[in-house]
Image (tube, grey):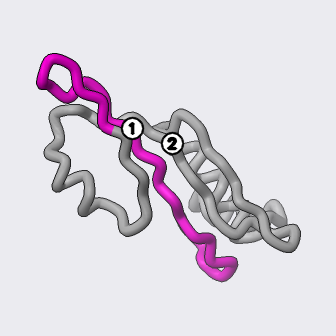
Amino acid sequence: MKKIDKLQSTGLSSSEIQVLEMIRNKRFLSIKLIIKNGEVDAIEGFERINTGERIIDVLKQHDYQNLEIKQSNGKIVCVNRIFKKKINPNTKSC
């Protein structure tokens, strides 16, 4: 039985399943839920990105994101991203 099927059989809504999938992903340092009318409307995930990646490549990865770039002695030492995902209640997967 697939992981998604197991979660759906527990009676969770598709938005709840998407939240759990982001939590289980373990790449995010923190996750923030935006709730409207008692339902999850969007998820924001805060993650630290490998400093070896080119900034232009990081910008192309997601349509909705905030980047924080820290530089020391002319070198990038830290890149943090807040990734925002709009929740579609009819979507089965994150």
Q: Amino acid at mark 1?
A: Asn
Mark 2: amino acid: Phe
Which residue is denoted by mark 2 in the rendering? Answer: 46
Q: In which quadrant will I find the N terminus?
A: bottom right
Which residue in the rendered view is the most extreme toward the right? 38
Verify whether residue 48 appears in magenta: no
Position above or below: 16 against 58: below
Magenta-colored stretch includes residue 71 = yes
- The 10 Å Cα crowd at callout 1, few under 14, some 14 to 19, many 20 or more, is some
**SS at mark 1 in the image:** strand
| Label drawn at residue 58 | none
Among the 4 quarters of the image, the one containing residue 79: top left
What secondary structure is the magenta-colored segment mainly? Answer: strand
63 up-or-down from 58: above or below: below
Q: Earlier in the sequence, mark 1 or mark 2?
A: 2
Residue 88 in the image: state x and y as whole percent: 62, 77
Q: For mark 2, give the secondary structure.
A: strand
Say whether marks 1 and 2 touch (CB < 8 Å): yes
In the image, what residue occupies the spot 51% across and 60% down?
A: 84
Task: Report the magenta residues as a range.
Answer: 69-94
* Image position, residue 54 (x, y; %): 14, 45
From the viewer's perspective, is 71 left or right of 83?
left
> Which residue is situated farthest in the bottom direction here?
90
